[in-house]
Image (tube, rainbow, N blue to C red):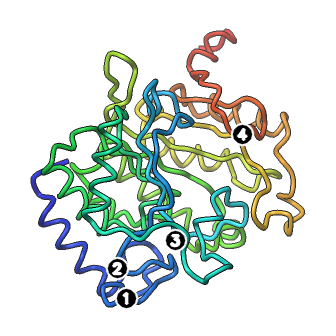
């Protein structure tokens, strides 16, 4: 976090008047109350906030990550696990959660810090960066000093990410798809692979290697999450190949997730209407070795939400591979 927050907050606030904060480039005047694809106008909606113990081990630690779950999203994943608050409520036509001012969001951040959380974990922040930075300006002025985690689905503009240099400490970014067709079909996210790769490249430029404290808690760096989907739909090999092309595999942590579960509208698509198999996940793990990714985590259970906490590099050593 830096002293330029007031200027950044003002700049981002002006961007709401013709919103092009994310790849959607809706062009609506959110400052005047118009809603874009994300179904959010001038103020952010917070669905919940609490010390989260289910993130990657160096994010959650033993005291939890200070997660703030925002309502709304700039994607429409048919298998979204958070669909209850990522899209419009069928009951009243509005987003679930509580609409908050910048001051109220700052209070939430400070409350999580007071609980001893290791960081502030902004979940699905891409569509409400102006509101977040306004809140950060207030919170930092009142003593917020723990790392900031940008926990994104990965549909981000690299130009917008560039504005966050010196503000975000840890990028926790999804790399969902190698195929644009699949990104459109399953997440309504045209151009996702290119936008995503360039955004992650910018994240890695800002935070070129992971930094941990003496207790193993991450202080800065980039973690890339990749959710393995059935039938190879996520394009794991190509995603990891592209990632290896923009950053040294030693300088980024990869979280390879097996937790896919056919939520929301996934049952309408036969090819993703099941959990992944052990064989599918095993093949995905082979890609980590193929492209030299030795830092990060794998999951066990094929559909369970809890991270196993197994370090990929340690697993390789246990298997006798160098």
Between 200 and 163, the one lying in front of the other is 163
4 vs 2, front mark? 2
Q: Secondary structure at mark 2?
A: loop
Instruction: Describe residue 2's horizontal placement relative to residue 88 as left or right.
Output: left
1 vs 4, front mark? 1
Q: Specify which label sits upstream in the sequence, 1 or 3.
A: 1
Q: Which residue is mark 4?
A: 258
Distance Cα–Cα, label 4 vs label 3: 24 Å
Q: Can residue 159 be seen at all in this image of the molecule?
A: no
- Above-or-below relation of 128 to 169: below
Distance Cα–Cα, label 3 vs label 2: 15 Å
Distance Cα–Cα, label 4 vs label 2: 36 Å
Q: Which residue is mark 3?
A: 74
Q: Specify which label sits upstream in the sequence, 4 or 2.
A: 2
Q: Specify which label sits upstream in the sequence, 1 or 4.
A: 1
Q: Position of residue 218 (x, y in %)?
A: 37, 30
Q: Residue at 65% across / 64% down in the picture?
A: 83
Between 90 and 165, the one lying in front of the other is 90
Q: Can residue 276 be seen at all in this image of the molecule?
A: yes
Between 292 and 305, the one lying in front of the other is 305
Q: Position of residue 207 (x, y in %)?
A: 31, 41
């Amino acid at each position: 976090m830096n002293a330029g927050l007031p200027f950044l907050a003002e700049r981002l606030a002006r961007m709401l008047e013709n919103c092009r904060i994310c790849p959607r480039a809706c062009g609506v005047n959110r400052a005047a109350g118009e809603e874009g694809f994300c179904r959010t106008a001038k103020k952010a909606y917070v669905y919940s906030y609490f010390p989260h113990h289910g993130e990657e081990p160096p994010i959650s630690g033993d005291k939890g990550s200070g997660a703030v779950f925002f309502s709304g999203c700039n994607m429409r994943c048919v298998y979204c696990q958070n669909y209850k608050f990522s899209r419009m409520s069928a009951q009243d036509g509005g987003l679930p959660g509580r609409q908050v001012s910048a001051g109220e969001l700052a209070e939430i951040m400070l409350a999580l810090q007071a609980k001893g959380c290791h960081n502030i974990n902004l979940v699905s922040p891409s569509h409400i960066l102006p509101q977040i930075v306004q809140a950060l300006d207030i919170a930092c002025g009142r003593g917020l000093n723990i790392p900031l985690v940008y926990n994104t689905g990965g549909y981000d503009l690299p130009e917008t990410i560039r504005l966050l240099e010196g503000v975000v400490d840890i990028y926790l970014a999804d790399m969902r798809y190698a195929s644009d067709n699949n990104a459109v079909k399953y997440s309504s996210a045209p151009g996702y692979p290119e936008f995503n790769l360039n955004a992650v490249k910018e994240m890695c430029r800002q935070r070129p290697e992971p930094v941990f404290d003496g207790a193993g808690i991450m202080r800065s760096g980039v973690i890339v999450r990749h959710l393995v989907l059935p039938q190879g739909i996520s394009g794991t090999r190509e995603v990891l190949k592209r990632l290896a092309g923009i950053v040294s595999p030693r300088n980024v942590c990869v979280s390879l997730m097996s937790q896919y579960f056919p939520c929301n509208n996934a049952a309408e698509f036969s090819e993703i209407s099941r959990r992944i198999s052990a064989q599918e996940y095993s093949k995905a793990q082979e890609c980590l070795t193929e492209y030299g990714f030795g830092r990060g985590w794998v999951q066990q259970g094929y559909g369970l939400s809890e991270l196993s906490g197994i370090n990929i590099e340690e697993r390789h050593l246990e298997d006798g591979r160098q």
